[in-house]
Image: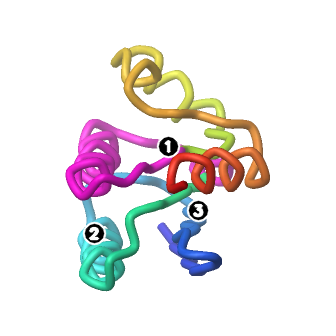
């Protein structure tokens, strides 16, 4: 899995590609997010449009990240999950827990509104 992170207007944008499964990549993702949280960044948008496959460990990572942001009074939004991640979110009923939007502009608008 590859991860790209960009910080814009106090929002952390993560773009993930490949397979979101238990691996050193997911540990690096969590460590990277923790650094942003240490810098008081509490809004995050995660683009899942290029994730081919996600397993229970990958779902657990997303839940852990969501918990980290919400426990600090922030929010995390998922952007345009690909087919398999979308099915896994529905199967686990986590689509009721996560905010899922179609595009980055919608995520940005919701995160900026929530922060004000």
Q: Is residue 76 visible?
A: yes
Label of residue 30 in the image: 2
Q: What span is colored magenta in the figure?
A: 48-77
- Rendered position, 5 above or below 52: below
- Rendered position, 22 above or below 83: below
| Crowding at mark 2 (Cα within 10 Å: few <14, some 14-19, many 20+) | some
Gap in Å between the C-alphas at discs 3 and 1?
10 Å
**To which residue does mark 1 refer?**
53
In the image, what residue occupies the spot 74% across and 45% down? 106
Residue at the farthest front position: 116
Q: Quick one: label 2 or label 3, which is nearer the N terminus? A: 3
Between disc 2 and disc 3, the foreground one is: 2
Disc 2 secondary structure class: helix
State yes or no: discs 2 and 1 in contact (Cβ < 8 Å). Answer: no
Q: Quick one: label 3 or label 1, which is nearer the N terminus? A: 3
Viewed as shown, does residue 56 lie left or right of 13?
A: left
**Total marks in image:** 3
Disc 1 secondary structure class: strand
Instruction: Confirm whether the magenta stretch covers residue 66.
Output: yes
Q: Quick one: label 2 or label 1, which is nearer the N terminus? A: 2
Disc 3 secondary structure class: strand
Residue 24: give x, y in percent of width and height. 26, 73
């Amino acid at each position: 899995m590859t991860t790209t992170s960009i910080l814009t207007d106090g929002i952390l944008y993560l773009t993930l590609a490949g397979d979101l499964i238990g691996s050193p990549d997911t540990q690096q993702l969590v460590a990277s997010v923790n650094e942003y949280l240490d810098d008081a960044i509490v809004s995050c948008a995660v683009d899942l449009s290029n994730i081919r496959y996600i397993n229970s460990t990958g779902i657990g990572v997303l839940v852990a990240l969501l918990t980290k942001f919400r426990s600090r009074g922030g929010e995390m939004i998922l952007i345009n999950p690909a087919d398999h991640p979308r099915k896994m979110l529905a199967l686990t009923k986590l689509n009721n827990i996560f905010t899922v939007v179609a595009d980055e502009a919608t995520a940005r608008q919701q995160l900026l509104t929530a922060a004000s």
